[in-house]
Image (cartoon, rainbow, N blue to C red):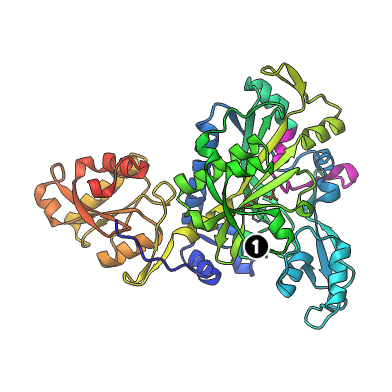
Amino acid sequence: MKELESKKPTIEEFTVFCKKKGFVFQAAQIYGGLAGFFDFGPLGVEIKNNLKAEFWKKFVLKREDIFGQDGSIITNQSVWKASGHVDTFADLVLTTKETKTKLRADHFIEDTLNIPVDGMNAEEINSLIKKHNLKWKGEEFEEVKNFNLMFVTQVGADANKNSIAYLRPETAQSIFPNFKQIAEVSRAKLPFGIVQIGKAFRNEISPRDFVFRSREFEQMEMEYFFNPNSKCELLTEKQKKTKIMFLSAENQDKDSSEMIETTIEKLLKDKKLNEYHAFWLAEFFNWFTEDIGFKYENLRIREHIKTELSHYSKGTFDIDYKYPFGYKEMLGMANRGNYDLNQHQEHSKQKLEFFDEANKEKLLPHVIEPSLGVERFFMAILNETYINDEKRGNIVLNLPPKIAPYKVGVFPLVNKEELTKVAREIYEDLIEEDISAFYDRSGSVGRRYARADEIGTPYCITVDFECIEEGKDNGTVTIRDRNTTEQKRLKVESLSGVIISLIKGNLKFEDL
Ligand code: GAP
């Protein structure tokens, strides 16, 4: 297949494209928007739903050891005290002395001095500010302060200390308190997982890079519970041999961002992670490259340095994507040990221990937590597939058919009733078969192809006069492939079957 010539967008081009096509735009734009909040338009929501559906299919529906849930966003405030978020879920904020402008300290230092500051404490930040005499637009800073990122609200009409509630900053804490109940109703045996997709909220000090760092976003999280004394039977040889580009904690400690190519097996040998962690890292990495279609060279795995680890983590590895602004975290994967179950057991005074039948042992299971942001996944897949095709003179979104908002565009060659009638019938037959399609009869057919390419439609069907002469039942139409622009003739009666096979990947266009 002819490779599409690829020219990647800058973040500005990317943002303009998303707005122009109505994928994503500022929330409440008519009022000037609100920083860090976005709305997904008609096509954006389809792509987002498709990404979530692929995740759910892969990690819930196709696995016997994983169960889904949908927890409430607001819950008993004790959950957030127990989890440690009330005390420690904070970023360092710099405030200017006169205008009281607030800046996220680590971002400001990183941008100004061009050094990594992950995990620096307030004292270290203050001393860097003094040493380099750093100012913001001529203004000096007050001492750096902690700023808790949780949005606070009130439940019920009476404001008192018991009515305080928080919008959840991670979906994970809707899972841990339910762990025992879900295990019991699902008759789960260790190891097993609970997955949830849902909204999370963080009052980010400086939201930036479009939807990459927003104040309201969605997470797809899994808590995979296991006995740390058991062997991980899931880990395969293929997974161990998975090659990855890796940025180690040691290199970051030396202020280096040099990556090496290594394998999951080598990380295990170096005792950087346990087998369950290795399994999930390989499973997600391979899902991204093999099923979703990210290029190997656009992904890397970054080990967190000790000082940047979250309060609950014994070790974290991010899968970073190469965004227009460089490699940044798309998915985080922490080994939370039994920190959360322990905390919830202590605070709730409820026994959360679980009997591991295989090892005849009662324990508080440990957990590996893959956590993927839907907006960051969305940005990565659009960036990966965005091609400014200069020869064609338009943008082509080379989206995998299963992720594309529409699978097919149906066009009459020209806007004449004999053609529009048949094209419309074909369109209606396709949507009746649950194939997401659109009908377009306005403008030249070339312009309609270009519009379809720009929103990532993998196939277009055009009804011409030949089809009318043949009669609809025996008739043939052209089907055009987005990536090659190649066209073939297909019988109308075979359309839905062929398109379903093409979308599922059971059939290749060149084999038609
Ligand atoms: N439960 C673990 C947890 O929440 P995290 O690394 O803070 O870990 C997990 O977040 C994922 O959520 C990130 O990898 C990212 O994809 C997404 N995420 C976090 N903060 C975000 C933000 N402000 N805007 C968009 N996505 C965000």
Residue 442 location, x and y as percent?
29, 64
Residue 138 location, x and y as percent?
81, 83
Over which residues does the magenta segment extend? 158-176
| Residue depicted at 22% across the width and 62% down the height | 415
| Residue depicted at 32% across the width and 69% down the height | 392
| 162 in the magenta segment | yes
Q: In the figure, is residue 511 to the left or right of 211? A: left
| Residue depicted at 35% across the width and 43% down the height | 505
Residue 248 location, x and y as percent?
67, 54
Classify mark 1: residues with Cα within 10 Å, few (<14), some (14-19) or many (20+): some
| Residue depicted at 82% across the width and 77% down the height | 134
| 431 in the magenta segment | no
Q: In the figure, is residue 377 to the left or right of 36? A: left
Considering only vertical position in the picture, is 350 above or below 247?
above
- Name the residue type under label 1: Ser
- Picture quadrant of residue 355: top right
**Quarter of the image that includes the N terminus:** bottom left
Nearer to us in this view, 135 or 168: 135
Nearer to us in this view, 3 or 341: 3
Residue bearing the label numbered 1: 257
Instruction: Find numbered disc 1 in the image and state the secondary structure of the residue it sits on.
Output: loop
Q: Is residue 459 visible?
A: yes
